[in-house]
Image (tube, grey):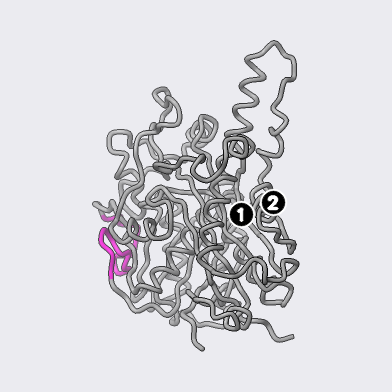
Amino acid sequence: MELKRVVVTGLGALTPIGNNIEEYWDGLINGKSGCAPITYFDAEKFKTKFACEIKDFDPLQHFDRKEARKLDKFAQYALVSSDEAIKDAGFNLDEVDKFRVGVIWGAGIGGIETFQDEVINFNEGDGTPRFNPFFIPKMIADIAPGNISIKHGFMGPNYTTVSACASAANAIIDALNYVRLGQCDIIVTGGSEAAITKAGVGGFNAMHALSTRNESPETASRPFDATRDGFVLGEGAGALILEEYEHAKKRGAKIYAEVVGGGMSSDAYHMTAPHPEGIGVERVMINCLENAGLKPEDVDTINTHGTSTPLGDVAELKAITKVFGDHAKDININSTKSMTGHLLGAAGAIEAIASILAMKHGIVPPTINHTTVDENIDPSLNLTLNKAQKRDIKVALSNTFGFGGHNACVLFKRLEE
């Protein structure tokens, strides 16, 4: 069968450097750090005392008090970002066939704050099981797309992808395939996460995954820098509207980009560490290029997973050099996690959005906080260090990888009529 073309017609974002698409993009191109001391709880006794929190977010500006109490923050973020994307896409909710509109959403953890608080409250009690009746529906990872579909009456496919930090990218790939195969006209996709909690920070600290640069939080996320010491925990959400091209064209929709391919692979190596030679990462990019029918030399930019961990950054760049060969030095490579921190299950969504906006505006956001060259990284690579660079972009690739060895890669292309 002939596959349908799939385009992006709406975007929404809630990030540590901007609470909507306009603010997010402004933060990206200006190299804004979203990192600061943690305000959500007293982190004095934690190894890491900082994170990339959402700023100036009041749920009561978006939900009434009763509704807000029923929603974990990760679900609130999902609803806010998806509302922005749906509005941006401009389709008439009364005119679309809602049986052909789905919601496929990524979340690596889900309602960890709800789970944490309920268990703490129970443990501090007398042993009588007094749990909030909304405990389970607030916590479960699939409740975000459930709430989006309920709010808007979307009755197509509805589920959550869970693959750690690759979750949102996997959601986008699934959405791409549903529309490609003609099973849906529109899919609301993306991801959300809200893990800046005692359990989240404490858990990642216990496995030595987080930076402990407490003396300079705003510079702690420093992908590719020789002095990097771990990732910075972030939170938020990103939403994309994927739509069948003819459906979008018929209604005169604004089109940001075409989604031309998605690739997946597994490291099959270690629970948390990447393969040192980046074999799985190499394979996921090859799979993505083949799925899109593109050649390595077609790619102009790569938004890397680039978490700022000593092992991960080197392995990913090795894989890029292997896949793209001599062309690798002509690609603008960057890591927007240097600004947003690592949004875990939402990372693939906000980084796909960054890739799409870079293509739209002809500007590649920088990798900030780079001060010291790493001798293990090929110096001929253009890592877009510290300052945004203008670039005519026709094809952009976005990488995301997750604990468990999950690798996902998405390719976007400037629309050609």
Q: Is residue 237 visible?
A: yes
Q: Amino acid at mark 2?
A: Gly
Q: Give me the disc on residue 106.
A: 1
> Upstream in the sequence, badge 1 or badge 2?
1
* Residue 23 falls in image quadrant: bottom left
Relative height, residue 346 to residue 136 (above, below) = below
* Residues in magenta, as a range: 373-389
Q: Is residue 161 visible?
A: no
Identify the element where label 2 is drawn.
helix
Give x and y (percent) for residue 72. 60, 39
Q: Residue at x 42, y 80 (%)?
A: 394
Q: Residue at x 53, y 72 (%)?
A: 9
How would you rate the neighbour count of disc 1 (Cα within 10 Å): few for under 14, some for 14-19, many for 20 or more? many
* Residue 284 falls in image quadrant: bottom right
Q: Amino acid at mark 1?
A: Gly
Relative height, residue 133 to residue 337 (above, below) = above
Give x and y (percent) for residue 111. 61, 39
Q: Is residue 377 magenta?
A: yes
Relative height, residue 65 to residue 324 (above, below) = above
Camera-near label (1 vs 2) is 2
Q: 136 left or right of 368?
A: right
Identify the element where label 1 is drawn.
strand
In this view, the residue in front, 223 or 174, is 174
Placement of the N terminus among the 4 image quadrants: bottom right
Q: Is residue 272 magenta?
A: no
Q: Residue at x 66, y 38 (%)?
A: 138
**Majority SS type along the magenta span:** loop
Q: Which residue is mark 2?
A: 146
User: What separation in Å lies between label 1 and label 2 (alpha carbons)?
Assistant: 12 Å
Give x and y (percent) for residue 269. 60, 53
Q: Residue furthest front?
A: 94
Give x and y (percent) for residue 351. 46, 60
